[in-house]
Image (spheres, rainbow, N blue to C red):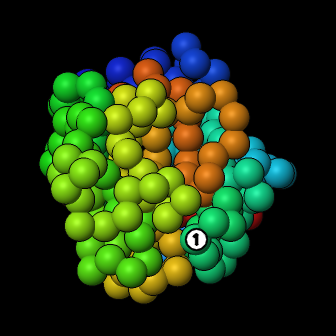
Amino acid sequence: MRRLLTLLSVTLLAVGGAPVAHAQVTPWFAQLVGRATQVISVVGVGGSKAKMDVYQRTARGWQPVAAGIPAWIGANGMAPQTHDGEMKTPMGVFTLDFAFGTAPNPGGGLPYVQVGPNHWWDGDMKSPTYNTMQVCEKSKCPFDTDPASGTENLNIPQYVHAVVMGVNKARVPGNGGAFFLHATDGGPTAGCVAIDDSTLVDIIRWLRPGALIAIAQ
């Protein structure tokens, strides 16, 4: 783990994030994350931009792993409760359930799915599998695959690597779905959080089950 944290800090320096001393701090989310030991903090800095900080909890308390990673959020900013089509990033504390991508598994502690043309995120609000990953040929999918329905084909450049955020896990139709931490294309997202892919790969390698992402304005 020490080697991974060192590599992460070095990489973040290369892409604009600032490695920080391993001093104990009390981050803003400390009372919101239960017994979690890994937390990614995303705080809006205005418009569709945010700052990401990475934290590890040790026997000495919360330790910053890296700070100041530039991130993109929804084109329309953030909201406490999101809805399909709003182009806003949800605020709150969410699980990081599994990783996926068009690229092979880079390693790490989370389950990883390598996706291709037949992988979808079901955004059809009338579908019983709304807000889940599904695998099917387009002509045989039991849900609406038209992008207007909210369904996404996952075989796109922004999903070279991604981590699923556990937003709307109850799968309430209309309360939003397909929220990921994914590679940036250099601009705002439809509600996800996006960062440089090389930094994301290092984070994926560092993540373990139980990690959380905390998002606030």
Q: Is residue 139 above or below residue 158?
A: below
Q: Can residue 82 be seen in this view?
A: yes
All told, the count of numbered labels is 1
Q: Position of residue 63 (x, y in %)?
A: 45, 48
Nearest the viewer among 79 and 66 is 79
User: Alpha-carbon neighbours of circle 1 within 10 Å: few (<14), some, or many (≥20)?
Assistant: some
Tell me the residue that label 1 is attached to.
Answer: 84
Rendered residue at 39%/81% (across/down) = 126
Q: Where is residue 66 in the image (x, y as percent from the top left)?
A: 52, 36
Rendered residue at 31%/51% (across/down) = 120
Q: Position of residue 217 (x, y in %)?
A: 73, 64
Quadrant into which the N terminus falls: top left
Q: What element carries label 1?
A: loop
The part of the image, by quadrant, that contains residue 92 is bottom right
Rendered residue at 37%/64% (across/down) = 144
Q: Is residue 120 above or below residue 81?
A: above
Q: What residue type is labelled 1?
A: Asp
Q: In this view, does 34 lie above or below 86?
A: below
38 to the left or right of 189: left
212 to the left or right of 186: left
Q: Where is residue 10 in the image (x, y as percent from the top left)?
A: 46, 18
Q: Residue extending furthest right?
A: 46
Nearest the viewer among 185 and 196 is 185
The part of the image, by quadrant, that contains residue 194 is top right
